[in-house]
Image (tube, grey):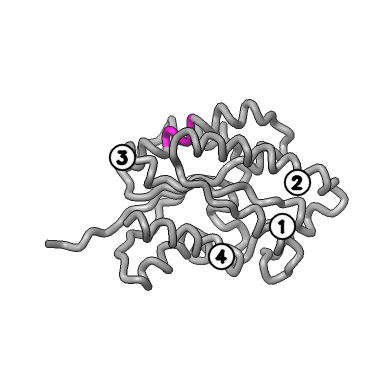
Amino acid sequence: MAKHVYSYLALGDSYTIGEGVPLFESFPYQVVQQLRKQHISMHAPEIVAKTGWTTFELADYLINHSFNEHYDFVTLLIGVNNQYRGLSVTDYAEEFEFLLRKAIHFAGGNAGKVCVLSIPDWGCTPFAHGKHPEKIAPAIDAFNNAAEALCLKYSVHFQDITAFSRQTGKEKDMLAADGLHYSGKAYSEWATGVASWMRKQA
């Protein structure tokens, strides 16, 4: 009997495509690399993400494009651009719930195969200098609280990467050249958490 090769759909924005780093250093590709090293057969990740996307823009793309009928794993990381543009948490929650339901659908209706990553706190990065970082943290928390509550409602795994972003946001080796996005080293830490979760579900 042929060994199952797992499929993985990664939904998001610049943090999912790995803005500023080579594609293979993005967190979805590092997840796959880590699992392959642990002898779990994985297809390359299918990444549906674009720098600047909000929940609405990701939802609009999903509605208007075709995808595989089923994926073994789905990750979702979205919302930083909602916060950056000053959009409401209420609208975010409504759109995020739609995306969460889509993610579960992509996972064959199995909420246990979906992982949501929290929004990192860009207010801790050099890019935020002069942009009132003290106001960014509570705003990020509000968006994350809304997402986490919906994950609880739908029994979806919620992985906190916000605390890590706050601990390492000023460390140069954790950042891409733009001083806003993250480096392959930082994405490796995110990937370790996601890969650990996937390994338990495989």
Query: In the picture shown, does residue 35 fall above or below 145?
Result: below
User: Residue 114: where, in percent of width, then height?
Assistant: 42, 45
The residue that disc 3 covers is 108
The quadrant of the image that shows the N terminus is: bottom left
Horizontally, residue 36 falls left or right of residue 52, namely left
Distance between the Cα atoms at labels 3 and 2?
Answer: 35 Å
Horizontally, residue 72 falls left or right of residue 33, namely left
User: For this rendering, which residue is in front, 196 or 82?
Assistant: 196
User: For this rendering, which residue is in front, 180 or 37?
Assistant: 37
* Magenta highlight range: 98-102
User: Residue 149: where, in percent of width, then height?
Assistant: 56, 35
Q: Which residue is drawn at 87% across and 50% down?
A: 130
Asked whether the residues under the numbered discs 3 and 2 touch, taking CB atoms below 8 Å apart as contact, a structural biologist would say no
**Circle on res. 166:** 1
* Residue 69 inside the magenta-drawn segment: no
Amino acid type shown at disc 2: Ala
Name the magenta segment's main secondary structure.
helix
The residue that disc 4 covers is 189
User: Residue 118: where, in percent of width, then height?
Assistant: 59, 47
Task: Give the SS element for disc 1.
Answer: helix
Q: Residue at x 75, y 42 (%)?
A: 138
Neighbours of disc 2 within 10 Å: few (<14), some (14-19), many (20+): some
